[in-house]
Image (cartoon, rainbow, N blue to C red):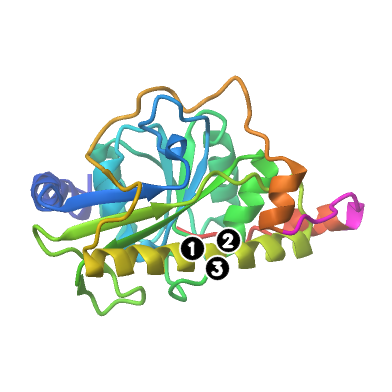
Amino acid sequence: MSIRTIGNHVAVAAIIPALKAWMGTLQCRALYEDPAIDPVCPECVGPNLYLFWHEYILFPFYLRGHCNLTMLLSRHRDADLLSLAARKMGFEFVRGSTKRGGMQAVRGMMAAGKTHHLTITPDGPRGPRRCMAPGAIYLASRLRMPIVVMGFGYDRPWRLKSWDRFAIPRPFSRARAVTSRAWQIPADLDRDGVEEYRRRIEDQLNRLTDEAERWANEGLRRPGERPVRRQAAARPAVSDCPRVTSREEMASSVITSDSDSPDGLREVRRLPRKISA
C-alpha cells in the first residue's frame, strides 16, 4: 500500500465523523413532485438514475448512503479520497469520466444499473459548471431507466474557488431539495434524440436548482414540504414491474425521437465518450 493510499485512509477516517456532525446540524427539507422517487420510500420503484449538479454533492452524500446507490466517480487521483469516503458512507461506485475511462465507465454503470440505482453529476468532473454532458441520457436510454432530476440549495453557503464553485453549507443553516418525478427516456435514442433530451434535462436541472436555492435563501414554508433526515433504503432497488411513462405524459414534457434507423444506432454506440463524474 502506497504512502498516498495510507494517507487517504487516515484522512477519510477523520473526515467522515466530522462530515456527519457538520451536515447533521442542517435543517433539511424537500419538495417532491412524487415522494416515491426517494430510495428510502417503501413505494420507491427502481432502479432510477438520479442527476444533480456537482457543486451540491455533499447533500445526497450525507443523506442517502446505504440506499443501493452506485455513483460515477472520476478516475483522476483527486477522486481517490472521494471513492474511499463513498464506500464508508454506504455507496458503491464506478470509476471513469469525460477524458479517462469513458467506455469502461459506461459498461460499469450499465452493469450496476441492473441491481442498483445510479447517480451522476452530469457537469463533472471538470465542467463547465451546470452544463450537462450527454452520457446520462445515453445510459437511461440504453438501460430503459427513469431519470430523476434533483435541485439542491443552501442558505448563503461558502463557495470554493473551484470550477463548480463547490458549495459548503454553513452549520445550522437551511438545506433544501426540489425533485422531479421519474421520467422514462425512450429506448435506443439516436444522436439527435440524445441531444434533445440532454437540453431538456439540463434546463430542468437548472430550474430546480434555482428554485431550491431561492427557497433556502428565503426560508419561507412551502406547501407540501417535508423534513428530510439521514436514512437507509427501505427496500432493494430492483423492481419486478418496470416503470412506464405514457405517450401522453411524454408528449407533455419532452419531445420523443425516432431511433429505428440503423445509422442512428451506430451513432449512439459512438456517443458515450463524454459522460460525467
226 lies left or right of 14: right
- Tell me, yes or no, whether the highlighted magenta stretch contains residue 82: no
Q: Position of residue 201 (x, y in %)?
A: 58, 61
Q: Is residue 262 left or right of residue 52?
A: right
Using the image as rendered, state which of residue 202 and residue 13 is in the foreground.
Answer: 202
- Marks 2 and 3 close (CB-CB < 8 Å): yes
Mark 3 sits on what residue?
203
- Residue holding disc 2: 201
One can see residue 85 in this view: no
Picture coordinates of residue 183 (x, y %)? 60, 46
Amino acid on which disc 3 is placed: Asp
Magenta segment's dominant SS is loop
Residue that appears at 57% across and 35% down: 111
Q: Secondary structure at mark 2?
A: helix
14 and 121: which is toward the camera: 121
Quarter of the picture containing the C terminus is bottom left
Percent of width and height locating residue 264: 85, 57
Amino acid identity at mark 1: Leu
Q: Position of residue 103 (x, y in %)?
A: 61, 52
Residue at disc 1, secondary structure: helix
